[in-house]
Every structure is written in C-alpha cells, then in structure tokens.
Image (cartoon, helix red, strand yellow):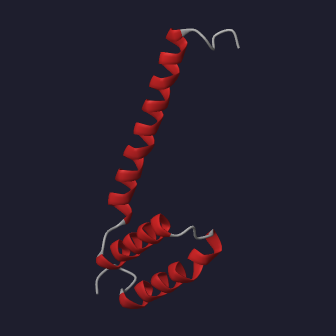
Amino acid sequence: MRYRTNLNVQGFIKGAYAAAIGTILGACVLLGRIAIGDWLTALVALVSLSSCSVWKVSNPCWLPPRLSSGSSRSRCSSPNGSS
C-alpha cells in the first residue's frame, strides 16, 4: 500500500485500465463482425442489446429467444450453408 500515493504508479494503473478496456472493446467488435453474419442474427443482437439497455433481464430469460432463433435458423438453412 505504500505506492498508493505515488503519482507514477497511479498513472501506470490508469494506463493499464485504458489498455485493457480498449483490448476488450476491440475483441468485442471483431467477434461481433464474425458472429453476426445474416439479418436474423443481427435482429436478435439488436433486440438483445436494446432490451438490456432498457430493462435488467436475468440470464434464464434469454434462453427461449435464443433457442427459438437458433431452431428457426437451422430449419431455414441446409447443413452445407446453401439455401
């Protein structure tokens, strides 16, 4: 705890936090670009994001929409990826 008042250490910690947040945000953008490939997935992502920002929804409540979108997607496409 002797470094708590050291300004150099505080600056380093702030920089490390900023770097970690930037890395996590960059990974989220890249994974989102890979994962969201069609309109149905984009719609599910937008509905999920908007409802998360409006209401506090617990994790078990997300299961039925995910299952229904996944099952409808698997019925709409063939195994080799062509419609």
In this view of the protein, which residue sits in the foreground, 67 or 6? 6
Tally of numbered discs = 0
Q: Residue at x 57, y 83 (%)?
A: 64
Q: Residue at x 45, y 24 (%)?
A: 15
Asked if 74 appears above or below 28 in the picture, the reply is below
Q: Residue at x 47, y 81 (%)?
A: 70
Q: Position of residue 17 (x, y in %)?
A: 49, 30
Q: Quadrant of residue 36?
A: bottom left
Q: Residue at x 45, y 38 (%)?
A: 21
Q: Position of residue 57 (x, y in %)?
A: 58, 70
29 sits left or right of 15 in the view? left
Q: Quadrant of the C terminus?
A: bottom left
In this view of the protein, which residue sits in the foreground, 68 or 21? 21
Q: Position of residue 49 (x, y in %)?
A: 43, 66
Q: Quadrant of residue 75?
A: bottom left
Q: Quadrant of residue 33?
A: bottom left
Q: Quadrant of the N terminus?
A: top right
Q: Position of residue 12 (x, y in %)?
A: 49, 17
In this view of the protein, which residue sits in the foreground, 49 or 41? 49
